[in-house]
Amino acid sequence: MISFEEAEIRSNIIKALAHPVRLMMVDLLREGEKQFSEINNVFQVDKSTVSKHLTVLKEAGIVSSRKDRHDMIYSLEVPCVIDFFGCVTAVIENNVRRQQVCLCKR
């Protein structure tokens, strides 16, 4: 069993992912590094909001950034975070199957 401290660390990383915009940002970065301006153009929110979401992901160690002339470039620090998405999808699919079975039994 993991320690409470390790559970807290894991929880903080999961919390960083626990927002639809941040999940979308991670998925966008799956394709490779992106300039801030590219990321900002995808979302219908102001620049400061996009920046705050990227900061949360960066502080959690999920994304990294580097300066490139006039723009920041963002990339996934640990691309294996995408594997987590696969696991979440498996849970969703399992839940749907369980609900279908329940409906069929009625």
Image (cartoon, grey):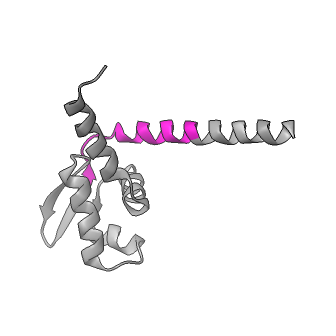
Quadrant that contains the N terminus: top left
Residue 6 visible to the viewer? yes
Residue 61 in the image: state x and y as whole percent.
Answer: 21, 46
Pick out the residue farthest to the bottom: 46
Where does the magenta region start and end?
75-91
Residue 35 in view, yes or no = no
Number of numbered discs overlaid on the protein picture: 0
Q: Does the magenta stretch include residue 25?
A: no
**Residue drawn at (36%, 40%) of the image:** 81
Q: Residue furthest top?
A: 1
Front-lying residue, 21 or 9: 9
From the viewer's perspective, is residue 41 above or below residue 79? below
Answer whether residue 82 is magenta in the image.
Answer: yes
Residue 48 percent location from the top left of the image:
24, 76
Q: Which residue is drawn at 27% across and 77% down?
A: 47
Instruction: Out of 30 and 84, give the one closest to the viewer.
Output: 84
Task: From the top left corner, tell me how far across and down residue 65 is, in percent.
Answer: 18, 56
* Quadrant of the snapshot with the C terminus: top right
> What residue appears at the point 85 percent right and 39 percent down from the top-left corner?
104
Main secondary structure of the magenta stretch = helix
Where is residue 101 shown, x and y percent of the image?
78, 36
The residue lying toward the viewer, choosing from 45 and 41, is 45
Q: Is 52 located above or below residue 94 in the figure?
A: below
Left or right of 56 on screen, residue 25? right
Residue 19 location, quadrant? bottom left
